[in-house]
Image (spheres, helix red, strand yellow):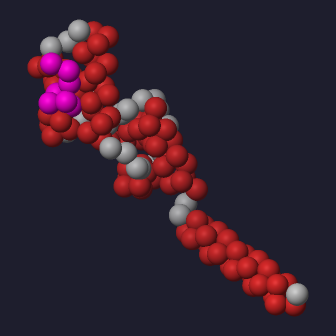
Amino acid sequence: SSSLSEKKASSIKAKQSSTKSSENSSKKIPREYISALIKGQEYADSMYMSKKAVYNQLTSDYGEKFSSDAANYAIANIKANWNKNALHKAKEYQEEQNMSPDAIYDQLTSDYGEQFTPDEANYAIQHLKK
């Protein structure tokens, strides 16, 4: 039974040291950066925004007002499939507004619209229902 309690003790110590190292590594990343990442991930996941649109929302005086450094950190660490986000938006335009593929492409790539890259918009158009 002493070996069992020794195993438990070493397991607890291992968990404590891994918790401490993750706390230390998270302390190195400013809290603003973490907040920007969480907010940016929410925009990408729930609103299917483009990378550029998420960045603009995070840094906007009318949006989240994060620093450009925090927004850049968020964009670099967001787990998103930007092609799929573009396709989701394209389907909305097709189904809810009955837009043509050309008009959808323009909306997806417009600086006043969704701000997807041309490659992401092309992916979306190619995968729309014909």
Q: Position of residue 35 (x, y in %)?
A: 55, 48
Q: Is residue 36 left or right of residue 55?
A: right
- What is the residue that sits farthest to the bottom in this orientation? 2
Determine the residue positioned at 27% across, 30% down: 87
Determine the residue positioned at 76% across, 77% down: 12
In the rendered image, the vertical position of residue 1 relative to residue 71, given as above or below: below
In the rendered image, the vertical position of residue 103 relative to residue 47, given as above or below: above
Q: Nearer the viewer, residue 58 or 93?
A: 93
Q: Is residue 34 left or right of residue 56?
A: right
Based on the displayed image, in which of its 4 quarters is residue 99 positioned? top left
Determine the residue positioned at 64% across, 69% down: 23
Q: Nearer the viewer, residue 54 or 45?
A: 45
Q: Which residues are magenta?
A: 124-130
Q: Is residue 6 left or right of residue 81?
A: right
Q: Position of residue 32 (x, y in %)?
A: 54, 52
- Residue 89 in view in this figure: yes
Q: Position of residue 128 (x, y in %)?
A: 20, 24
Which quarter of the image is occupied by the C terminus?
A: top left
In the rendered image, the vertical position of residue 89 relative to residue 94, given as above or below: below
The number of numbered badges drawn on the structure is 0
Q: Position of residue 78 (x, y in %)?
A: 41, 50
Based on the displayed image, in which of its 4 quarters is residue 56 positioned? top left
Determine the residue positioned at 32% across, 34% down: 85
- Residue 65 in view in this figure: no
Specify whether residue 126 is painted magenta: yes
Q: Is residue 26 left or right of residue 61?
A: right
In the rendered image, the vertical position of residue 32 relative to residue 119, given as above or below: below
Which quarter of the image is occupied by the N terminus?
A: bottom right
